[in-house]
Amino acid sequence: LDKNAEMIQDFVKNGGIVWEPTQADQNEANVDWLPPGLSCVRSDRDSPDFEILEADHRLFNEPNRMTEQTFKGWGHQGWPTVWEVIASQKGFDILMESLGQPVIMEAEFGKGKFLMMAIAPDKYYIVGNDDHTKDMAKLFMENLINYVEEFAAVEVEGKLATKWAHLKM
């Protein structure tokens, strides 16, 4: 991703959205492909504790109403709901946090957005430890896909853009 930082930034500036679920801090602690003015640094603290700060945000409401109870108790192998917390950030609005550190955050850039997470619904809905984890992560994936659809009409010269929100889960 670092080698394509300019292309990623142009994509978002022109109206796209880049969503990054949990990434291991050992592989990418510092997200170097973000534009100037934005930063995201991950750490290895995992936690079952979290709080939704922006409960009215579309990400937690469409098409499924997601509450703190919805996220409670998620697990995959030994990892809890919050996996690889965001240790520090600059320029993002925090939507969910864990013990004072960001879990879900977003930032506008040009006509688009960057959406960063310290949870992994893409993994949990497929290989979660139990049915609750899988079922609730699937609902959140539906919300995520619905949310990114807003940005699907991005215009990028000479590039193919796909409307991912039409994929079926």
Image: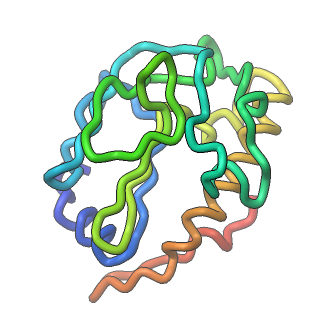
* Residue 155, quarter of the rendered image: bottom left
**Count of numbered labels shown in the rendering:** 0
Q: Is residue 100 above or below residue 136?
A: above
Residue 22, percent from left and from top: 47, 34
Residue 63, percent from left and from top: 77, 60
Viewer-nearest residue: 52 or 129: 52
- Compared across the picture, whether 162 is left or right of 126 comes to left
Q: Is residue 8 above or below residue 93?
A: below
Q: Residue furthest right?
A: 131
Coloring scheme of the render? rainbow
Residue 23, percent from left and from top: 41, 33
Q: Residue at x 62, y 17 (%)?
A: 80
- Compared across the picture, whether 122 is left or right of 99 comes to right
- Compared across the picture, whether 59 is left or right of 97 comes to right
Q: Residue at x 82, y 38 (%)?
A: 135
Q: Residue at x 44, y 43 (%)?
A: 105
Q: Residue at x 65, y 43 (%)?
A: 55
Residue 168, percent from left and from top: 74, 65
Quarter in which the C terminus is drawn: bottom right
- Compared across the picture, whether 48 is left or right of 86 comes to right
